[in-house]
């Protein structure tokens, strides 16, 4: 089955997350270097949220000089309808008046938020409407949202320790033609604290994998339902390392099983 592209994104792809990593009070050389490294390496899909402290504002500033190269995904995250309008206005301000992918964060008040985002889409302020959730217990609700036909993409966690999406969410996304953004490829860092030996990773070398983080990124993107993975880092050189995992060949069942064994 063909991968589902969305928002002009060439898929599958590595992008960049900003949770915690971009929550700094002012733009600094590190955040600028991470952003430039991502764009230089073709990791043009960048994700943020008003939930991530200063991250949206900082990303907006670091990406501004090359805004046309980026595909920006951000979120609306509140139970309050008026606050939602303010969040959307602020995001549009940060990203030069237009956002490519606008997501309902954690499905918060999703019916009204979809109404609001669709109204903004009709005004040409955003391209596609999407929804996110990180918790398996909420995937039933996420399925309901997917079946409304109102979201063109979803964002969910997927890594060897978080595989709930394989059962119903991925097949449904494929059936409905919904793009999948993959969050938490390293389980928020838990999977990369300790790396397997070079010898253990050797069977993955023919797939262009030379490091453990790359093995985890390729694990996620090897599922045909996925479109883009958004690892977050505070180190520019790691952004380059991560971006290098965005090309095929993709893992088959033996390689995926090996990564699951190595992840423990
Ligand atoms: N919608 C939602 O509910 C939701 C929830 C969670 C996440 N997200 C999105 O998904 C993005 C990714 O998830 P996440 O940030 O939670 O976790 P993640 O990307 O799985 O892991 C981030 C951690 O991995 C480390 N790391 C990154 N690249 C590495 C490398 N090459 N080698 C070693 N360590 C590396 C980083 O540490 P260093 O900084 O030291 O490199 C950081 O601590 C978020 O930033 C956010 O945009 C969305």
Image (cartoon, rainbow, N blue to C red):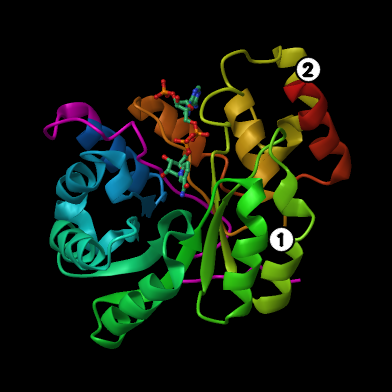
Q: Is residue 7 left or right of residue 146?
A: left
Q: Which residues are magenta?
A: 1-30
Q: Which quadrant holds residue 31?
A: top left
Q: Can you say whether 141 is above or below 235 in the image?
A: below
Query: From this viewpoint, is residue 59 visible?
Result: yes
Q: Is residue 239 left or right of residue 145?
A: left
Which secondary structure is most common in the magenta stretch? loop
Q: Secondary structure at mark 1?
A: helix
Q: Position of residue 258 (x, y in %)?
A: 83, 30
Name the residue: 65% across, 67% down: 143
**Which is nearer the N-term, disc 2 or disc 1?**
1
Q: Can you say whether 108 is above or below 14 in the image?
A: below
Comparing labels 2 and 1, the label whose residue is closer to the camera: 1
Q: Position of residue 124 (x, y in %)?
A: 25, 83
Q: Secondary structure at mark 2?
A: helix
Within 10 Å of disc 1 (Cα), the crowding (few <14, some 14-19, many 20+) is many
Within 10 Å of disc 2 (Cα), the crowding (few <14, some 14-19, many 20+) is few
In the depicted view, which residue is nearer to us: 40 or 126?
126
Residue 16 shown in magenta? yes
Name the residue: 14% across, 53% down: 65
Name the residue: 32% across, 38% down: 37
Mark 1 — residue? 170
Q: CA distance from mark 2 to mark 1?
A: 29 Å
In the depicted view, which residue is nearer to us: 244 or 226?
226
Query: From this viewpoint, is residue 248 visible?
Result: no
Mark 2 — residue? 200
């Amino acid at each position: 089955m063909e991968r589902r592209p969305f928002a002009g994104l060439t898929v599958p792809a590595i992008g960049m997350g900003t949770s915690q990593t971009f929550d700094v009070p002012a733009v600094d050389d590190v955040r600028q270097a991470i952003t430039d490294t991502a764009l230089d390496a073709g990791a043009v899909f960048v994700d943020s949220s008003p939930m991530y402290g200063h991250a949206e504002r900082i990303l907006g500033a670091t990406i501004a000089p090359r805004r046309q190269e980026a595909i920006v995904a951000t979120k609306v995250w509140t139970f309050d309808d008026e606050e939602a309008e303010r969040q959307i206005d602020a995001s549009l301000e940060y990203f030069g008046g237009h956002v490519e992918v606008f997501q309902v964060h954690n499905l918060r008040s999703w019916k009204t938020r979809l109404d609001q985002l669709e109204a903004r889409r009709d005004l040409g302020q955003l391209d596609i409407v999407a929804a996110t959730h990180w918790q398996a217990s909420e995937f039933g609700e996420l399925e309901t949202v997917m079946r409304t036909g109102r979201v063109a993409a979803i964002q969910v966690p997927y890594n060897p320790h978080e595989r709930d999406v394989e059962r119903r969410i991925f097949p449904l996304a494929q059936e409905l033609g919904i793009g999948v953004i993959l969050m938490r490829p390293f389980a928020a860092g838990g999977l990369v604290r300790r790396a397997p030996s070079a010898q253990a990773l050797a069977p993955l070398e023919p797939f262009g994998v030379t490091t453990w983080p790359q093995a985890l990124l390729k694990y996620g993107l090897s599922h045909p339902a996925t479109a883009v993975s958004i690892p977050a880092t505070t180190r520019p050189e790691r952004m380059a390392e991560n971006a290098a995992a965005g090309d095929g060949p993709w893992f088959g069942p033996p390689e995926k099983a090996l990564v699951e064994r190595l992840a423990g």
